[in-house]
């Protein structure tokens, strides 16, 4: 077996590229924007993990002696006040890496994953519509030529298929709400991926 045999056929790569080229400009923009937001949020998360919490300069903070007695309502001693200031300084964190970056990362991932799911679901629906049409033609031909009495089997299959579809859609809804942090952006991404233009 040579190296040329193990490489994916070139038409497989061009089909994916052609499919992406047919994506409308607004959907490409939304997809690129979600990737950008995910990247910024991810870099913020990584920076927050690498740099650790921001510690304020405790020497620049006011001491208990410089605060008027009327504002020291808890009657803290200088040692207690300086300890409280030190604890507050140690607990100070960077606003972007703690608040904004995780949300940006979750929003971008939600939209991107839902976009891919919507795009795949649209492809699945197209294939299943074609397969259903072929099956219906075959079933109709078998019924027409009295090969098999198909109607009772079709009625039972339809009720089973409806139950399966209902259960699958409920499972998909549960998956989306449990695993995608932003359900609104997940829904928007799914719709954007599912729409043709």
Image (cartoon, rainbow, N blue to C red):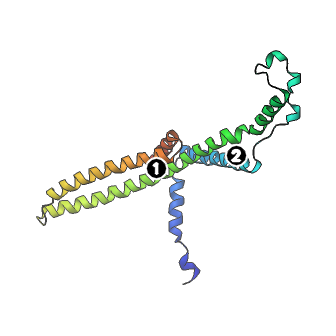
Residue 15: percent from left, percent from top: 50, 62
In the image: residue 131, left or right of residue 145:
right
Residue 123: percent from left, percent from top: 42, 55
For image coordinates 85% across by 21% down, the residue present is 67
For image coordinates 50% across by 66% down, the residue present is 12
Q: Label 2, secondary structure: give it.
A: helix
Q: Which residue is mark 2?
A: 44
Q: Label 1, secondary structure: give it.
A: helix
Q: Which residue is mark 1?
A: 118
> Could you say which is closer to the camera, residue 121 or residue 84?
84
Q: Who comes first in sequence, dot 1 or dot 2? A: 2
For image coordinates 61% across by 49% down, the residue present is 35
> Could you say which is closer to the camera, residue 190 or residue 195?
190
In the image: residue 163, left or right of residue 124:
left
Residue 189: percent from left, percent from top: 51, 45
> Could you say which is closer to the camera, residue 17 or residue 48?
48
Q: Quadrant of residue 57?
A: top right
Q: CA distance from mark 1 to mark 2?
A: 28 Å
Position of the N terminus, as image quadrant, is bottom right
In the image: residue 159, left or right of residue 99:
left
């Amino acid at each position: 077996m040579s190296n040329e045999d193990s490489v994916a056929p070139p038409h497989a790569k061009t089909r994916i590229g052609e499919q992406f080229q047919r994506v409308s400009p607004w959907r490409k923009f939304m997809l690129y924007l979600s990737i950008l937001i995910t990247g910024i949020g991810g870099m913020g998360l990584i920076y927050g993990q690498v740099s650790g919490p921001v510690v304020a300069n405790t020497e620049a903070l006011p001491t208990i002696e410089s605060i008027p007695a009327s504002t020291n309502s808890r009657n803290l001693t200088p040692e207690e006040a300086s300890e409280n200031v030190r604890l507050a300084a140690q607990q100070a964190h960077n606003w972007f890496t703690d608040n904004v970056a995780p949300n940006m990362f979750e929003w971008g991932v939600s939209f991107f994953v839902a976009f891919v799911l919507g795009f795949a679901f649209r492809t699945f629906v197209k294939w299943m519509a074609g397969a259903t049409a072929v099956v219906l033609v075959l079933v109709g031909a078998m019924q027409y030529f009295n090969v098999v009495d198909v109607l009772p089997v079709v009625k039972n299959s339809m009720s089973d298929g409806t139950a399966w579809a209902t259960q699958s859609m409920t499972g998909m809804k549960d998956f989306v709400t449990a695993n995608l942090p932003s359900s609104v952006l997940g829904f928007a991404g799914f719709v954007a991926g599912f729409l043709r233009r």
